Image: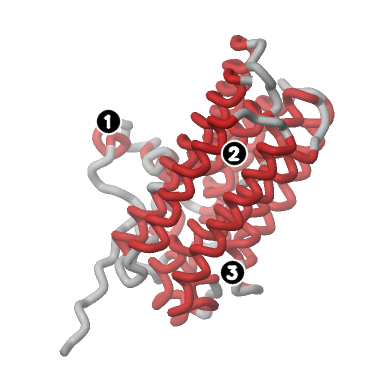
């Protein structure tokens, strides 16, 4: 029996509000910064929000917490966009040969490399402006993350585990949020960071299954290719370890029971992903990947409830 043809899901949706309402001359820049695909911003932002709440026992300063939330929210939009811009410049030749990514602005020629580079410089300048709002330790910690941002796009050429490197990079906010509130790093922040790392390792492995055939053809490496048919049990393992680290973070911070209730619900959501994802369907992989925003909100709600209960 012939295997059904694989359905490819583009990552540049044609019916988004950016396509309908943003003026044509600037529309490619919105797409380059992935304004039309906010899931990446949420996955970058939520660990930072977790960390802000973790560092605020009892939530004594509601206005200060909201200010931190807003600053990190704006910063996540800017820096996720900067990372995407740099990634698209570096990967433009690969992206042009993959059905899912060939319509990206740099790969398609809608934005030239020099213009994309100027846009990147502007994004980094705006990100620095946000970072200067915080204490010196957070400023130094944030600046250090640039080494990870600019190294990540090359990892798929070197190792089958670029997803692990993304986990190191994408969860930096779990350190920054805590540092912004306290001016230092505690063991609970490091445990939260480790939990975020394994969470990313799971969801980005799902994401990588969208491109596994193209990656083989182009000689690009990924955890999806490394794990192959063994991916599903590894997803359960990655997600289980993530919850264990997040639980340790709660223990070290002496959080009340609502946090652990949230983690239990979050674990169910993660295991649903691992058990139900169709790793041969680009569309389903994208749906399961996107559902990680729900997990992030579940953990955040548990953290807030726990701090209010303390």
Q: Position of residue 3 (x, y in %)?
A: 21, 83
**In the rendered structure, which disc, 3 or 1, sits on the residue that comes first in sequence?**
1
Is 6 placed left or right of 180 in the picture? left
Which marked residue is nearer to the observer: mark 2 or mark 3? 2
Instruction: Work out whether mark 2 precedes mark 3 in sequence or the reverse, and give the earlier one.
Output: 2
Say whether residue 34 is visible.
no
- Disc 2 designates what residue? 47
Q: Quadrant of the C terminus?
A: top right
Give percent across and percent down for residue 111.
Answer: 45, 49
Q: Which residue is mark 1?
A: 21
Image location of residue 59, percent across then percent down: 63, 16
**Crowding near the residue tagged with mark 1, few <14, some 14–19, many ≥20 C-alpha atoms within 10 Å:** few
Tell me the residue that label 3 is attached to. Answer: 156
Q: Is residue 291 left or right of residue 92?
A: left
Q: What residue is shown at x 45% (from left), y 52% (from top)?
A: 270
Badge 1 marks a residue whose secondary structure is: helix
């Amino acid at each position: 029996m012939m295997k059904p043809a694989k359905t490819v899901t583009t990552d540049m949706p044609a019916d988004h509000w950016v396509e309908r309402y943003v003026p044509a001359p600037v529309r490619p820049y919105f797409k380059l910064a992935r304004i039309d695909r906010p899931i990446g911003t949420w996955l970058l932002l939520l660990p930072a929000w977790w960390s802000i709440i973790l560092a605020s026992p009892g939530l004594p300063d509601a206005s200060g917490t909201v200010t931190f939330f807003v600053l990190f929210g704006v910063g996540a939009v800017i820096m996720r966009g900067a990372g995407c811009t740099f990634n698209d410049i570096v990967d433009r030749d690969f992206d042009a040969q993959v059905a899912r990514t060939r319509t990206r602005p740099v790969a398609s020629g809608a934005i030239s490399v020099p213009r994309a580079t100027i846009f990147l410089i502007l994004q980094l300048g705006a990100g620095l402006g946000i970072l200067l709002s915080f204490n010196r330790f957070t400023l130094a910690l944030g600046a250090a993350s640039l080494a990870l941002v600019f190294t990540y796009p090359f990892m798929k050429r070197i190792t089958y585990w670029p997803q692990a490197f993304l986990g190191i990079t994408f969860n930096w906010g779990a350190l920054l949020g805590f540092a912004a509130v306290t001016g230092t790093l505690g063991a609970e922040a490091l445990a939260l960071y480790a939990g975020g790392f394994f969470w990313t390792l799971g969801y980005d492995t799902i994401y990588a299954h969208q491109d596994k055939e193209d990656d083989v053809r182009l000689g690009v490496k990924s955890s999806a290719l490394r794990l192959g048919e063994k991916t599903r049990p590894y997803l359960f393992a990655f997600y289980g370890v993530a919850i264990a680290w997040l639980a340790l973070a709660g223990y070290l911070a002496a959080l009340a029971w609502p946090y652990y209730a949230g983690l239990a619900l979050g674990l169910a959501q993660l295991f649903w992903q691992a058990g139900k994802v169709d790793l041969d369907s680009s569309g389903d992989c994208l749906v399961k990947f996107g559902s990680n925003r729900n997990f992030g909100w579940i953990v955040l709600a548990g953290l807030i409830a726990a701090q209010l209960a303390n």
